[in-house]
Amino acid sequence: MAKGKTTPFEFLQQVRQEGSKVTWPTRKETMVTTGMVFVMVLLAALFFLIVDQILRFGVGAVLGLGG
């Protein structure tokens, strides 16, 4: 087999071999990881909401806006 010359059939065989080497997560690991992602997204959203409100208050105070 010449280097760099791979037939579609050989390519699919190689993909299948590599896929069998992967350690796939269990359902529980996937659910825990998904839950952690949602928690981190919620925390990031709350953080940026708080920072935004602080900056809005600060800019409003400096520019004399908002009453």
Image: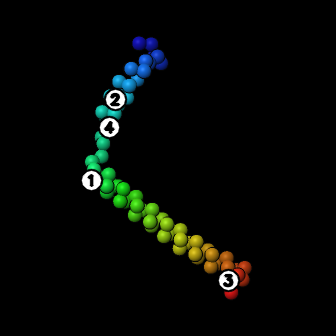
Query: Tag 2: residue type?
Result: Arg
Whole-percent x, y for residue 33 in the image: 35, 55
Vertically, is 23 above or below 57? above
Q: Nearer the viewer, mark 4 or mark 2?
A: 2
Q: Which amino acid does label 1 sit on?
A: Lys
Give me the C-alpha separation between circle 1 and circle 4. 17 Å
- Tag 1, which secondary structure? helix
Q: Residues within 10 Å of mark 4 (few under 14, many from 20)?
A: few
Q: Where is residue 34 in the image (x, y as percent from the top left)?
A: 36, 56
Tell me the distance, in whole angstroms, between the alpha carbons under discs 3 and 4: 57 Å
Between marks 2 and 3, how big is the CA–CA gap? Answer: 63 Å
Residue 61's quadrant in the figure?
A: bottom right
Indicate which disc residue 28 carries.
1
The residue depicted at 53 percent of the width and 73 percent of the height is 50
Whichever of callouts 1 and 2 sits on the residue coming sooner in the sequence is 2
Amino acid type assigned to the residue bearing label 3 in the image: Gly
- The residue identified by callout 2 is 16
- For marks 3 and 4, the one nearer the N-term is 4
Residue under circle 3?
66
Horizontal arrangement in the rendering, residue 65 relative to residue 11 (left or right): right
> From the image, which quarter does the N terminus lie in?
top left
**Residue 6 quadrant:** top left
Residue matched to label 4: 22
Residue visible at 40% across and 64% down in the picture: 39
Splitting the image into 4 quarters, where does residue 52 fall?
Answer: bottom right
The scheme the figure's colours follow is rainbow
Q: Nearer the viewer, mark 3 or mark 4?
A: 3
Looking at the image, residue 4 sits to the left or right of residue 33; the answer is right
Whole-percent x and y of residue 40?
Answer: 42, 62
Q: Distance between the residues labelled 4 and 2?
A: 10 Å
Q: Work out how far the residue at label 1 is from the one at label 3, CA to CA, in angstroms.
A: 50 Å
